[in-house]
Amino acid sequence: MDRPNFDLSEKERMGLIRLLLANLGQYYNGTDKLKVSRQANREEVRSLVLSNDFENPLDFKHSLSNVLKGLTEYGLHTPHPRYFGLFNPRTSFASILADVVTAVFNPQLAMWSHAPYAVELEYQLVQQFGRKFGYSQDVGGTFCTGGAEANLTAMVMALNHAFPDYGKSGIQGIKQPPLLYCSRETHHSILKAARVCGLGSNAIVPIDTDDRYRIDLELLKSRLESDIASGMAPFMIIGTAGTTGYGAIDDLEGLSAIAGKFGIWFHVDAAFGGALKFSAKQEKYLRGMNNGDSITFDLHKWLSVPMGASLFLTSRPELQGRTFSARTEYMPKDSKIAHGSFPDPYVNSIQWSRRFIGLKIYMALSFHGWKALEEQVDHHLELAEHLRERLLATGWIIKNHTVLPIVLFSHSYFDEDGAFARQLCDEIVHSGTFWISVYPVQGVNALRACITNYASSKEDVEALVKLMNIYVEKYMGNRPAKKSVGQQGSI
């Protein structure tokens, strides 16, 4: 039997690359000309997917064209400058090149000896980001597929820290019920992590928030004292720097003080808000983050790199090896001699086989430097402030108080009508001109716009406000609004 030629011929490769580059170039240059989204028909999508018959493969160009058509016609275009949704930015060209390079070279980052350059590069990035976030020279960490994996890594390390036999005996070896504490606004990846660890959702103690959706420190202290007196075993406190819905930043200094007092692992989920560290103007909102035993930071949320790319950082690197080490007979034994004392990635993290995740941000930094990150973050913050100003000037009310580029708002006339926000959001999304979402504040739905695209402009923001005002006029008819100007509290 002849071996398959998966390489294709050079002529075939070049033809496909030309086709691919032409289509990708058209998409990358003209994303703003597309509708942000369209309503997809399941039958149409399924028909296109199944048109590639694996028993009778299509010719190469036809197969590639089908994929490009599917992604163009049946997808929400998160790179669009008028996508004001969740934390899904446009990807920088440098980071796109990185993913192409990674796919071709396909380095195996499980061990240093197999990919010395790639492993060393990621190690040095961990050190640099750790220092940017306020850690000392003694920085541990690893690149992850996303914030969910980084948060899971933190939870497993917190368990090993609090219960030294956890790695052998597991949950059943813990004599007192283990508990972790977080705000009710904490990301639900924490819930998943608790289930994966065998803790279950009952091990999570959700603490109520203040009027700005930050964890209530007095309630936390009171609950900790009560639980300890009842024979429980608190092992972890989680602070969030930028909740997904509201954009709240917990009092990280206050949380770290409480964690220190009770001897509990303090983890900071800064998946989105951690990027404020790159803004000289606004990094003050992250005071206390450097006191965290561990930090989650998603590069793919605000730093414009492709999915998925997250960082787990820790000031307790010695605990990584104790938590994730594994002895094998089949892995190479020469790498420690080659690179000295820092451990191979596979014995220092959840992942075993590893993709070259760190190259995405390395290429972006190599092209543009740290200064460009500061400019990008400040640009988004300024656009969000411009959005707030335009909303307030036309009768809207700002419903959240955050420095982050997350704006929750409702119109003064419909402030108590939660159905209004949902209806307006649906109309805007169905129009394909913008993508926004809805989030409840004090039990009433508000509209939510988040800016994470470096290509978004003041013109895009103003066009959103103009369109929403047109819809509001349609709903209001000739009835006067209750308030002539919007309202906003201070950040």
Image (cartoon, rainbow, N blue to C red):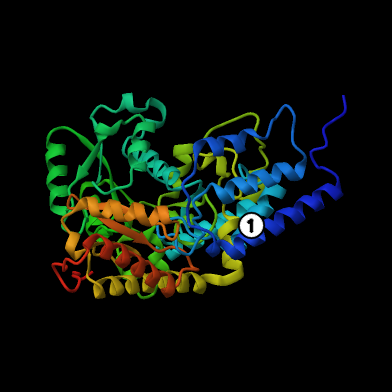
Do we see residue 238 in this rendering? yes
In the picture as drawn, the residue positioned furthest to the front comes out as 478
Q: Position of residue 360 (x, y in %)?
A: 58, 57
Q: In the rendered image of this protein, does residue 332 appear above or below residue 375? A: above
Do we see residue 271 in this rendering? no
Is 10 situated left or right of 387 in this image? right
- Type of amino acid at the residue the image marks with label 1: Ala
Q: In the rendered image of this protein, does residue 234 appear above or below residue 71? A: above
Query: Disc 1 designates what residue?
Result: 98
Q: Which quadrant: the N terminus?
A: top right
Say how many tags the image has: 1
Q: In the rendered image of this protein, does residue 399 appear above or below residue 353? A: below
Q: Position of residue 96 (x, y in %)?
A: 62, 58
What is the crowding at mark 1: few (fewer than 14 residues within 10 Å), some, or many (at least 20)? many
Q: Position of residue 323 (x, y in %)?
A: 44, 38
Residue depicted at 30% across the width and 56% down the height: 424
Q: Give residue 410's quadrant in the image.
A: bottom left
Q: Please tell me which residue lies in front, 242 or 470.
A: 470
Is 246 situated left or right of 109 in this image? left
Residue depicted at 66% across the width and 37% down the height: 333
Q: Which quadrant: the C terminus?
A: bottom left
Residue depicted at 61% across the width and 54% down the height: 120
Q: Position of residue 113 (x, y in %)?
A: 68, 45
Is 159 situated left or right of 354 in this image? left
Residue depicted at 53% across the width and 39% down the height: 351
Q: Please tell me which residue lies in front, 292 or 327.
A: 292
Q: Please tell me which residue lies in front, 60 or 133.
A: 60
Q: Secondary structure at mark 1?
A: helix
